[in-house]
Amino acid sequence: MSHSASPVADAWTPAALQAVIDAHRTRPGAMLPLLHAIQARFGFIPEEAVPRVAEALRHTRAEVHGIISFYHHFRTHPAGRSVIQICRAEACQSVGSRQLEAHAKQALGLDYHQTTPDQEFTLEPVYCLGNCACGPSIRVNDEIHGRMTPEQFDALTDELSATVVEVK
Amino acid sequence: MAVTLYVPRDTTALALGADRVVARLERGARARNVEVDIVRNGSRGLFYLEPLIEVATPEGRVAYGPVTPTQVESLLDAGLLEGRQDHPLALGLTEEIAYLKRQQRLTFSRIGLTDPLSIEDYTSLRGFKGLERALALETQAVVDEVTASGLRGRGGAAFPTGIKWQTVHDQPAGQKYVVCNADEGDSGTFADRLVMECDPFLLIEGMTIAGLAAGADQGYLYLRSEYPLAHAVLDEAIARAVAAGYLGDNILGSGRAFHLEVRLGAGAYICGEETSLLESLEGKRGLVRAKPPLPAIEGLFGRPTVVNNVLSLAAVPFILDQGGQAYADYGLGRSRGTLAIQLAGNVKRGGLVELAFGTSLRELMEGFGGGTRSGRPLKAVQVGGPLGAYLPESQWDQPIDYEGFAAFGGVVGHGGVVMFDDSVDMGEQARFAMEFCSVESCGKCTPCRIGAVRGVEVIDRLRAGESRDKNLALLTDLCDTMVDGSLCAMGGMTPFPVQSVMQHFPDDLTPRQAVTAGGTTC
Ligand SMILES: Cc1cc2nc3c(=O)[nH]c(=O)nc-3n(C[C@H](O)[C@H](O)[C@H](O)COP(=O)(O)O)c2cc1C
Ligand code: SF4
Ligand code: FES
């Protein structure tokens, strides 16, 4: 069974960071593609990226910070191996996502935007995954799961804990 | 000869285990020494039947669903590979399934039939015929065809698409853009996703026609980051369209150019608002711009820009191929053509229903949807996304069209229909509307930014039973201020669901014994 393995994040180095920036800086409206590329490669946007991005795109650091914080998708700290997003939007509410959400927080011992101490799970809210006829929906890295019950959630997280070791 | 099977590969089918069904099918066929060719098609949009297996037979495709991986063996034993129909999951000929047969699929005529990434499949079902015709016409004639169709924007505002295209067409020559709004943020909607995952060339064709009509040689598809599969499919489809000469510097040898690129959003609902989207594409925070200037005159990077929803653009190939009149022949009043209704939430038979404007919600929710998934009575339905009102039963018989809905404060929007059974606490839903606005507001104007936070507090006080009359008056005022004082519909329409709860479900705004006020914050 192919649970999307955690996005394999490279440890960032100044040279690797600069290479990502150089690969995207000349595109029109380069800011978002660049930030996406940094996060896709390193798993988050390191603080050290801010002055480099600012310089490459002729922004102030404050502007770059403002842009990163405006968008919920971007994170400035490393995430766990599995990022679990729980859909909080209306269609999923109508089939029990509030209970699922409460269960997930309790089972993982996390509130939203937190990561387990062993770096295994990060919990995030999301507002609709486009699976609204078959909710409650959650997303684990790039995979979406439907009709999620608390029991299935536990089975899924157990399985993820068991497989992370094999991934590498 | 190999048996041809179809198992969908869209997000919902995958979310329900389609890949595991395929693995079992392959294994089971091998064990039986039968050669199978498993096509990963798009979904038909009948989500209550996913994962749906289809088998090609001389009479047509026959279907089985919804199939769990563990049921595959018994299906194979019951003669699935020969198309036998004795198994309890057998559905007969797919085309004869009432839910599908009763639809009027103009935009979604091809989904589920084809391998989404096969240009050959696409062209075998009239794909790129609209583009070929557009290439043979003057640009004005292309715009005229869209105007004649009566098509109005499917992203929410229902603005006539022909007029928008005409405006961009009439701007002096120079750099112009086509931007596809694929931010599909409304809860209860998935029709854009279905187009992108299941028939991506349709959207590419629609955008290319828009580019030809408007005089734009560059298109951007702004896709929400919550749709990783659509992203992968679109990137691959664009690469194949370029390789086959449908995109690029010399479209089908015409000497005319159109380039297309996918750009990812980053989890901000407000970036679905068109000016916020343009700011985001330019690399900024998604702050809403004041209008005028209209994007059609000063849009992306200050240049004239067509901004259209996925479904608006996806309607265009049919219109060019069959003529604007053929599209306008469907519909009701000033709402022409078909609407992609998305049955979602607590629904027994959820999925995509494409029908001419004019059906009632009751027919959709009961006739197609079969009532609630829980089996309990329906209590309320939210149509048109998080900014749409909650409609009580007295409003379910109204025929759906833009003007008719607006007359009673309803919103058709992007066509999402989210059903709730009688266990729903409408006070909690009202609170969520305000909470969502407080999370997603772009922050530019005070009534929206601060009002939504106050709204949550007032609703919490009401639900805790504090000074009922005073707090109801406060909530009424707050809603009025947000409606009147907000720059865009985020702040301007967030009160709609709240007001509808106050009006139709007032009891739910009183304290409940079992429920402690408030949900979770994030
Ligand atoms: C808060 C807000 C969110 C919106 N979200 C979307 C969206 O996700 N997709 C969309 O196509 N239009 C959305 N719209 C409507 C767009 O502003 C715009 O009207 C639309 O993209 C125009 O295309 P159309 O004429 O083809 O509908 C939104 C509007 C608002 C105010
Ligand atoms: S109403 Fe809200 S989202 Fe719209 S411009 Fe004002 S602050 Fe931004
Ligand atoms: S509302 Fe949860 S997937 Fe759409």
Image (cartoon, rainbow, N blue to C red):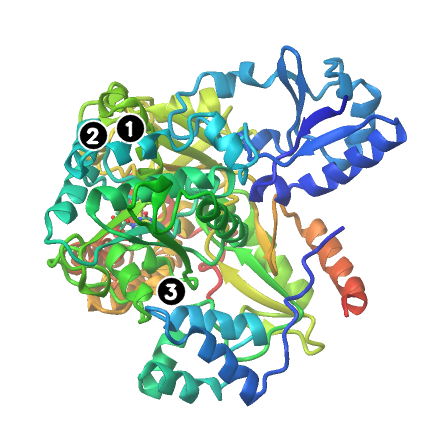
- Measured as percent of width and height from the top left, residue B425 is found at 44, 46
Under tag 3, what secondary structure? Answer: helix
Q: CA distance from mark 3 to mark 1?
A: 39 Å
Q: Is residue B402 above or below residue A27?
A: above
Identify residue type, mark 3.
Answer: Val
- How packed is label 2: few (under 14 Cα within 10 Å), some, or many (20 or more)? many
Judging by the rendered image, the residue that carries numbered circle 2 is B145
Identify residue type, mark 2.
Answer: Glu
Quarter of the image for residue B363 reads top left
Pointer 3 with pointer 1, Cβ within 8 A: no
Residue A149, numbered circle:
none
Q: Is residue B64 above or below residue B431?
A: above
Pointer 2 with pointer 1, Cβ within 8 A: yes
Under tag 2, what secondary structure? Answer: helix
Residue B319, numbered circle:
1
Tag count: 3
Q: Which residue lies at the image location 66% right of the left edge and 48% below the top edge? A: A149
Under tag 1, what secondary structure? Answer: helix
Pointer 3 with pointer 2, Cβ within 8 A: no
Give left or right: position of B464 versus B35: left
Give left or right: position of B90 versus B517: right
Query: Can residue A43 be seen at all in this image of the molecule?
Result: no
